[in-house]
Image (tube, rainbow, N blue to C red):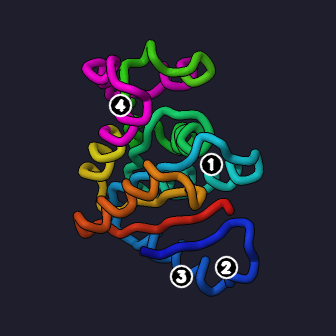
């Protein structure tokens, strides 16, 4: 698993970041899952939005969840580029999503709800949702903190399924 830190210049070199981005943007289009933390600084949200915009402009299909933070930024960028190449899979029904997310999610063409998970905790439903997202992709790009247990477990599961995994740490 490739691991990078967005905040620590000592572990991220321009060459390493260039190699990671190059792997992400290989010439043929792919199904790329982009997942991450809900608690993301604005500057990082803008970078994630630009990344998802560029990935979709290149013809890649983007799959994400409907949470705030990373996933919301990914949705925003993908929608700017080409809304038909975006699929959002929700851990629960649309009505269970935060109000600020619903307005954005209602504009998504390919929206998958999981109302059968409404009785589960958000953590349980999110873990199941992440597994579904990973099964639909060839590559996972994840933005997490070192204590983001659900996201780190998702990365591990993606590796076990022989997916390309690029993990960026915020801390």
Q: Nearer the viewer, residue 78 or 122?
A: 122
Q: Is residue 89 visible?
A: no
CB atoms at circles 3 and 4 under 8 Å apart?
no
In magenta stretch: residue 57: no
Tell me how far mark 2 sits from mark 1, CA to CA.
20 Å
Residue marked by disc 1: 49
In magenta stretch: residue 117: yes
Q: Give percent across and percent down for residue 41.
A: 74, 47
Q: Residue at x 42, y 35 (%)?
A: 123
Tell me how far mark 2 sits from mark 4, CA to CA.
35 Å
Tell me how far mark 3 sits from mark 4, CA to CA.
31 Å
Tell me how far mark 1 sits from mark 4, CA to CA.
18 Å
In the image: residue 89, left or right of residue 108: left
Q: Give percent across and percent down for residue 150.
A: 43, 48
Q: Secondary structure at mark 1?
A: helix
Tell me how far mark 1 sits from mark 3, CA to CA.
20 Å
Q: Is residue 35 visible?
A: yes
In the image: residue 16, left or right of residue 171: left
Extreme residue in the top direction: 95
**Mark 1, other Cα within 10 Å: few <14 / some 14–19 / many ≥20:** many
In the image, residue 77 sits, relative to residue 112, either above or below, namely below
- Sequence-wise, the earlier of marks 1 and 3 is 3
Residue marked by disc 2: 12
């Amino acid at each position: 698993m490739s691991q990078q830190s967005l905040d620590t210049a000592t572990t991220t070199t321009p060459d390493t970041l260039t190699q990671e981005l190059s792997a992400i943007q290989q010439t043929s289009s792919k199904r790329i899952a982009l997942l991450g933390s809900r608690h993301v600084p604005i500057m990082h949200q803008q970078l994630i939005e630009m990344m998802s915009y560029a990935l979709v402009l290149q013809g890649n299909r983007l799959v994400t969840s409907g949470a705030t933070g990373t996933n919301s930024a990914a949705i925003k960028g993908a929608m700017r580029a080409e809304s038909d190449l975006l699929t959002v899979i929700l851990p629960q029904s649309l009505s269970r999503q935060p109000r600020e997310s619903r307005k954005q999610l209602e504009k998504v063409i390919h929206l998958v709800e999981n109302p059968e998970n409404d009785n589960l905790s958000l953590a349980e439903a999110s873990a199941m949702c992440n597994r579904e997202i990973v099964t639909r992709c060839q590559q996972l790009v994840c933005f997490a903190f070192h204590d983001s247990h659900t996201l780190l477990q998702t990365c591990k599961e993606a590796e076990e399924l022989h997916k390309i995994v690029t993990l960026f740490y915020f801390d």
